[in-house]
Image (cartoon, rainbow, N blue to C red):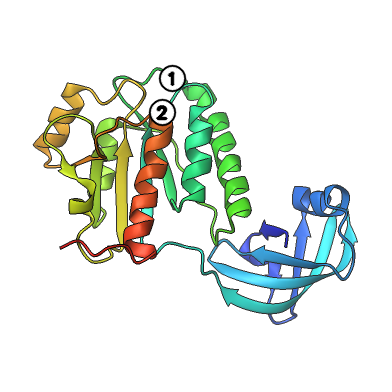
Amino acid sequence: MPRFFLPSDSFDNEGGQAVITGQDARHIALALRMAEGDPILLCDMRQNEYSCVITSIRPDRVCARICEVSRSQSEPPSFITLYQCIAKGDKMDTVIQKAVETGVCRIVPVRSDRCVAKITADAEAQKVGRWQKIAAEAAGQSGRGIVPEVCPPVSFGEALSMMERDRLYFICYEGDGTLPLPELLKADTPESVSFLIGPEGGISQSEIALAASRKTPLAGLGKRILRTETASSFVLSCISFRYELGGIDQK
């Protein structure tokens, strides 16, 4: 069933109706060629899902009758933030798409010493807007209850400060001084989790020293070195297995 994310003011619960406008209405009417009487699933980006039936349809406005409202069951038990050092080319697009599919709730791009890709201040808003669109498309495809936010880029130091607000946080690192990821995931389900993935060239020694000075945990991801566009999906899958799918209890 087609799924669309709408602002909460698109829903009139008392009147039992939802209204879709803009590009979504045009897509429903012209691309999907839906018709009156067709079922459609709408989400208010607050984890509420509305099972609806289309009552009228035009390219600029689609109305639907709300048949049932339920709470989304597709969100992870923890609010997960990915701090991703900016990757070059279309790798960042891949990271965002796959991270949304595997359960991330927020993505924060990070400028680090070894980032090859550089984003100018003039291009930043356009780039973040593109990434947010990719996140929205991935959320719809994977049946998410929210559209994860893609934030403006921050520095490595700013990322460390932001991560410290969460119950569980760590940097993924292939060097010495790491704890195995299962060791960090031993505790009961945390309310919030954040982790940082380095760029293609890895995290610099000065950045690792800064993290050590703040006692930020370093997580090892096993014996193989993962590409930057692979690592976040691997970590998110491990988090999902441990806290969402009832993985092996680590003691």
As drawn, 6 above or below 220: below
**Mark 1 burial class by Cα count in 10 Å: few <14, some 14-19, many 20+:** some
Q: Nearer the viewer, residue 97 or 10?
A: 97
Q: Which mark identifies residue 86?
A: 2
Residue furthest out toward the bottom: 14
x 29%, y 32%: residue: 224
Would you say the residues marked 2 and 1 are in contact, meaning their CB atoms lie under 8 Å apart? Answer: yes
Question: Alpha-carbon distance for marks 2 and 1?
Answer: 6 Å
Q: In which quadrant is the C terminus drawn? A: bottom left
Residue type (three-letter) at the residue carrying disc 2 = Ile
Marked residue nearer the N-terminal end (2 or 1): 2
Is residue 217 visible to the viewer in this orientation of the structure? no
Residue assigned mark 1: 117
Residue 108, how many percent across, how many down? 40, 40
As drawn, 191 above or below 215: below
Q: Secondary structure at mark 1?
A: loop
x 20%, y 59%: residue: 186
